[in-house]
Image (tube, rainbow, N blue to C red):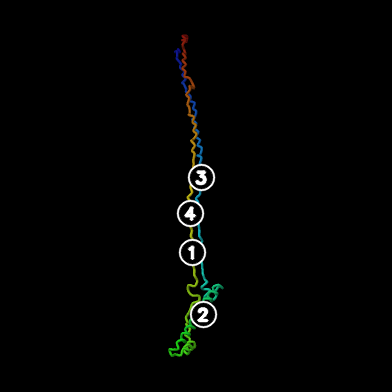
Amino acid sequence: MQLPQIRLQQTYAQIGLRTTQPNQEIEQQPADLSIQQTPAQMEIDRTPSQLIIDQEQAWGELGFKSIPTLIADEAEFAKNEALMAVAEIAQEGDQLAKIANKRDALMDIVAQKANPEPAKINIAFIPSPGSVKIQFTPTEVHINWKQGGATIDSTQHRPTHNYTPGKTEVYLKQMQSLQIDFIGTNVNQNS
């Protein structure tokens, strides 16, 4: 005997997911930079050094005088000699005028001229120390400067930001179902 049966056939529901990924784009444009440089200025004012060496006296003492100096020296020497000769003649005249002193003035004058004073001898350095004159003026440097600088202008740019959010869609991929079958509803009594 076959008993009636209930056959159940079930299909479960299935869901599906459709996902769209999010998208993000960021663009950053570099800043605009403008730099202006003002250079420093420097001025240097320099007076060169100066060295003056005067050797005229040294050369003169060595016997190498310039023509104008030689003429001036000889004129001075001649003038002094002439004055000394006039003074000597005047002195001798004064001696001869004093006959009243009962001295033989003429013999004194002859004795002075016959026996002159000894010549003065001395050691001399030629040229004499200090005959070369040196004058030195050092260099002078004056520095004037103006400080430069820099002017910087910058323009910033905001970033460009594009964002597309992601999505997830839920859908029914398969419907649930339940199928019920009855088997053996007919009873066979012959068997």
Read off the residue under disc 2: 82
Mark 4, Cα crowd under 10 Å, few <14 / some 14-19 / many 20+, is few
Taking depth in this image into account, of 169 and 53 the one nearest to the observer is 53
* Tag nearer the camera, 3 or 1: 1
Read off the residue under disc 3: 36
Residue 149 coordinates in the image, percent (x, y): 48, 47
Q: Can residue 135 be seen in this view?
A: yes
Read off the residue under disc 4: 144
**N-terminal label among 3 and 4:** 3
**N-terminal label among 2 and 4:** 2
Amino acid type, mark 3: Gln
Residue 167 coordinates in the image, percent (x, y): 48, 27
Mark 1, Cα crowd under 10 Å, few <14 / some 14-19 / many 20+, is few
- SS assignment at label 4: strand
Position of 165 relative to 41 (above/below): above
Mark 3, Cα crowd under 10 Å, few <14 / some 14-19 / many 20+, is few
Taking depth in this image into account, of 10 and 76 the one nearest to the observer is 76
Taking depth in this image into account, of 70 and 179 the one nearest to the observer is 70
Read off the residue under disc 1: 137
Tell me, yes or no, whether the two marked residues, 3 and 1, touch with CB atoms within 8 Å. no
